[in-house]
Structure formats: C-alpha cells, structure tokens
Amino acid sequence: MTAVTIVSAYYFLVFLSMGVVLPFFSLWFVSIGLSGQQVGMVAATPSFLVIAINLLIGSLADRAKDWRTTIILGHWCVAVLITCLFLSQQFYSVWLIWACSGALLLAISPVLDAASLRMSRHRGFPFHRIRSFGSLGFIAGVLGGGVVFDRFGIEWFLPVLAVIAWIRAIASVALPKFREGLDVTVSAPPVVNTTEAIAPQIAPVSSHSTANLRANNNGQQTEDDQRSTAQPAVNEYQPDSAQTDRQVLRDPFFIMVLLGAALINGSHGYYYSFGTILWQSAGYSETVISLFWAWGVVTEVLIMWWFTRIAKQHSARKLMLFAGAVATVRWIVFLFEPGTGLLLLAQTLHGVTFGVLFLATVNFIANWTSHEIAATAQSFAAMLTTASIAVTTAMSGWIHAAAGFYGYSVMGLVSLIGTLLVLIALGSRSRFS
C-alpha cells in the first residue's frame, strides 16, 4: 500500500475510536455512578492537562527523526492506560486515567495532522481527502457503538474502548516515515490568490516568497487586492532563521485568528459532553442518538471532499468567520429543544462548524509556518482549542444542572465572541511584522 493509503486508513481507525467514545462516554460515566458535575470535571481535565504538555509534545515530535515516533509511543501509552480502567472504576481512578490518556490523545492529534499535511503536500495529494477518511471512521464508530450499546448495554463501553485502543496502537507501527523525501531547508506551504488562502494541492512554485506577500504591513495592498492580482501559484516559504519562526508564533494577528477559531471550537464543549444525555432525556434511544451524531459527520465528509472548490474562492479567515456565524445559529436552534426534523437540519451544520473550521485552521497555520516548526505550530493552535474546550466542558456540568437545553445559549455566546475576534483580524491590515 502507498503511504497515503496507510495514513488514510489510520485516520479511519483513530476516528472510529473517537466515534465510539465521544457520543457515549457521558452515559458510561453516569452508569458507574458519577454525578453530572463529576462528568463535567472528568471530561474537561484532559483538555486542561494537555495545555501543559501540548507544545512540549509538538516540539519533541519536530526534533525527532520522524513524527511517527511520537505518534507510535503516544498510542501505546494510551492503550496501557485504558486497560488500567478495568482495575478500578472509582471516581478518582477514572479521573486520573481518563485525564492522562485523554491528554495524550489530544497532544498526538496535531502531530498526526501536521505530519500528514506536510506529507500530502509533498506528494501532491490533498490533505482534506485523507482527513475525510477519519470522518468516515467516526461515522462507523458512532453507528456501531449505538447499535452495540443499545442492544447489550452501556457496560460494554469499556471493553470495546480497550480493544480499539490496542488495535490503534498496534496499527500505528505501520505508519510511513512522514519526513522521507522532504527538504528540511525549504518547505512550501501553498498559497493560492491570497496571502493565506488554502491550496490543498501542490502547484508550480512562484518566484515570489511569502515574505513579499507579508510586505503589505504598510497598507500598499489589501487581501482582496492580492486576490484580484495574484496568480494561482504556490509561493515558496523561505525562513531566514529561527527568529522568523518565533515571530510568526508570537504575532498578534496570527494569535488572534487562532484564538477566535479556538473559541468557536470551544463552543462545542456542551454538545460533546451533554448532547447525548439531553437527547436521551428527550426520549431518544442510543441508536437514534447515534444517527444524529453520524448525520452531522456525514455532512463533514461531504464538505471535506468539496473543500478544494470552496478554498479556491475564499481565504482561510473568511472560512473561519463563516463557520463561527453558522455555529452561533446552530446553538440558538439547539436551545429551543428542536424536534427530529429541525434537529437533523441543525446537525447538518456540523460540516461547517467543525469541518470547514478545522480545515481552514490547519491550512492557515501550514501556509504561515515552516517545515521545521510544523508540529509545534499545530500544537500551539491545538493548545488554544483544548483550553477553550476545557473551560466550556468544565462549565457544562453546572450549566446542564441549571439550564438543560437552554445551556446552549452560553455556547452561542462563546462562538459569537470567537467570530468577532476573527472578524477583527479580517479587517486588520497587519501582516506579521
């Protein structure tokens, strides 16, 4: 099999496990005696913990001979930790094990994304096609999990989770060498028609460097001006030194865009933590709930397969802005306890609120960072996102107890703030001083 095929299959496996976990972990927590507040605490802790280790893991991955080393070690550690849940299911044991295993998974994810994105660009294959297999895996996991847990009971959650964790760890050994064939001195994040537009495929390299496109600090040319005058070609990224990379990671404009995207992502915290519990309280079975989750991810897959056409017309920040506006509308719909038809319509928006936002963010980062800090930069964005999700998830237990479905109004406010941050950055002429 080709490297692209292997990585696509691995994405399918990784997200299959997420499909089993994400919609049903809260039901399992409740089944072993955890309260609503405890569910929120356990669910949020991995996101808080990963803030402390994310940049470290990303930096170690960048310094390793190949990114696959970090991915393999991380998944084997997670498998061992999940197995330890069989020894004790008391609150503090579950809290500790879930925190460590969850934080490792969250830290590994941006490394896998960065490695796969660089490899796909080097081989001329669009990353979003590879990532779409992850979404297909999530659909398989959520549908399979819904059927199994509806028929045999939620007590089967842990055995299923452990089996998948070990399969994922063993399969990681088959991952290709992501750095093979990459030129470590010059990497080329594609830029199409704009300083930050998303270019999923490799095109001929332009003679203009990214530094030239950044030169509009003085206001000579706006983003829209560049779109009308630039040719659809890839601009070669030429970092002069390590100082260049540090400046990118510290630039207020860069941080504002990522912070806005992180808040929009964070607005999903209540949905991830208590969406299933709320739907179950409304009378839906595990099988029907799994269909709700799966339908949202189906739209995500469709978005990913059509992403090239979308990206050719709009910059990364404009796509983030659109995703944030749609997320705000989605949470407003949810707080009114919609019926099945309207609920399915709202779930259709998941393709935008997650799929478009994710692809826009990872490509925005790749277009503005060098090969040498690929995993570090993605980990930085992941740190902001997980911090945002950690806060909203930690709040979710209390929000659920106090407001039920009306708790989605808080998530609507969070996504609105994130959207406004991206909007402010969109109107700024600042370009990486």
Image (spheres, rainbow, N blue to C red):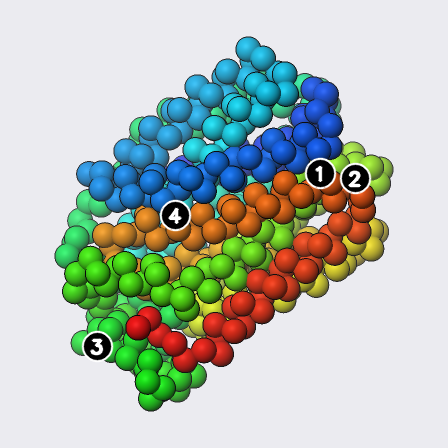
Residue carrying label 2 = 401
Residue 44 in percent (x, y) is at 58, 38
Relative horizontal placement of residue 325, taking residue 164 as reference (left or right): right
Label 1 secondary element: helix
Q: In this rendering, is residue 70 above or below 216?
A: above
What SS does tag 3 mark?
A: strand
Mark sitting earlier along the chain (3/2) = 3
Nearer-N-terminus badge (4/3):
3
The dot on residue 379 is 4
Which labelled disc corresponds to residue 397?
1
Position of residue 341 in the picture relative to residue 353 (left or right): right
Mark 2, secondary structure of its residue: helix
Which residue was labeled with disc 3? 208
Task: Tell us which disc is closer to us: 4 or 2.
Answer: 2
CB-based contact (under 8 Å), mark 4 and mark 3: no
Quick check: 157 above or below 217? above
In three-dimensional space, the C-alpha distance between marks 3 and 1, rounded to whole angstroms, equals: 52 Å
Quadrant of the rendered image containing residue 278: top right
Residue drawn at x 63%, y 20% as measured from the top left = 91
What residue is rendered at 28% in x and 79% in y? 215
